[in-house]
Image (cartoon, rainbow, N blue to C red):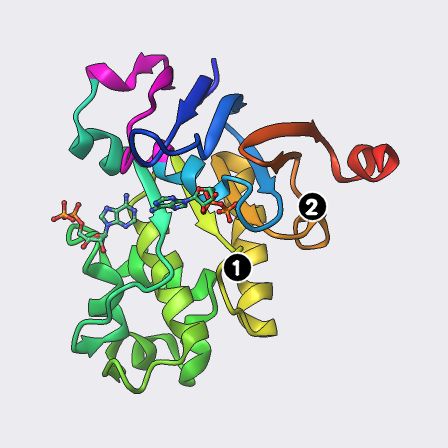
Amino acid sequence: GPVLEIRNVTAAYGPGLPPAVRDVTLTVPRRGHLAIVGPSGAGKTTLLSLILRFLEPQEGELRLDGTPYRDLTHAEIRSRLAYVEQDTPIVPGTIGENVRYAAPDATDDEVAGVLRAIRLADKVDTLDEGLDTPLTSTSVSGGERQRIALARALLRTPEVLLLDEATAQLDGLTEDAIHRCVRERAATGAVVTIAHRLSTVIDADTIVLMEAGRVRAQGTHGELLERD
Ligand code: ADP
Ligand code: ADP
């Protein structure tokens, strides 16, 4: 079955507030890239918050690998999912330490592999130096911070990798590195991204179009273009 199921989920931020997500049903397959696209206010971030269980639905339910969220603890859900945070904290120390921070048990080889995959090592000449390059929160660019967040998430070897591109200010290099990682990761696992525009998720296997809290359409990039 699918790794993640969202069934008829409706959620509001408070009593009396209109639902930010309305009767959304969606399944995330075990492999592949599913992109959620829509304008500002469509409910994309809310859906992500529901998946990460930062928010509880008023109606409907979510399931992780067939188990309803109500039978799982928050900690368990968050240990099985990885979210690439926009403002990932930078700890004083090396790139390696920064990446390892979210996955203390990762081996040097695993850390090096992830840094290579996201081309974070390009900040310096060699990977070894890359691992040992000291960082301070002021010496890290937005793009590097974004890639550190992705590296942390990848090291957690999550069942679902969640990425928010809609609020990201990505430079071209970072965008390329992230897109390549998403493609590689989607070959063996589940990736869910959220984005503003169809043009940034051309290679997603499935695109879900959201508008005013609802799923308006679902299909490949080609199918959705034909629809318009
Ligand atoms: P998107 O990520 O697609 O831009 P959001 O999920 O952030 O959309 O927002 C969906 C709706 O929920 C919007 O109407 C937004 O104003 C509202 N909303 C988002 N976050 C909050 C919040 N913390 N409190 C109240 N309303 C919110
Ligand atoms: P804690 O439960 O105290 O956050 P963790 O070991 O779960 O401890 O996480 C350590 C760090 O890893 C967090 O501070 C956060 O930056 C990151 N992290 C935690 N959960 C996730 C997640 N689901 N996705 C991505 N990063 C996470």
- Residue at 46% across, 49% down: 163
Kind of residue indicated by mark 1: Ile
Which quadrant is home to the C terminus?
top right
Quadrant location of residue 54?
A: top left
Q: How many marks?
A: 2
Mark 1, residues whose alpha carbon is within 10 Å: few (<14), some, or many (≥20)? many
Decide which of 122, 161 is in the foreground and name it. 161
Residue 8 located left or right of residue 204: left
In the picture, measured across the screen, residue 107 lies left or right of residue 158, that is left
Residue at the image position 47 percent from the left and 60 percent from the top: 117
Where in the figure is residue 196, as x and y percent of width and height? 61, 52
Where does the magenta region start and end? 50-71
Q: Is 97 included in the stretch rendered in magenta? A: no
Which numbered disc, 1 or 2, marks the residue that appears first in the sequence?
1
Residue at mark 1: 178
Asked whether disc 1 touches disc 2, contact meaning CB atoms under 8 Å apart, the reply is no
Residue on which the image places disc 2: 203
Q: Is residue 74 above or below residue 173?
A: above
Residue 111: which disc?
none
Eyeballing the image, is 5 above or below 176? above
Question: How far apart are the two marked residues, 1 and 2, measured between alpha carbons?
Answer: 13 Å
- Give the amino acid type for the residue marked by disc 2 in the picture: Asp
Residue placed at 35% from the left, 47% from the top?
83
Q: Percent from the top left, x then y, of residue 225?
A: 83, 40
Tell me if residue 118 can be seen.
yes
Q: Where 116 sits versus 214, above or below? A: below
Residue 65 sits inside the magenta stretch: yes
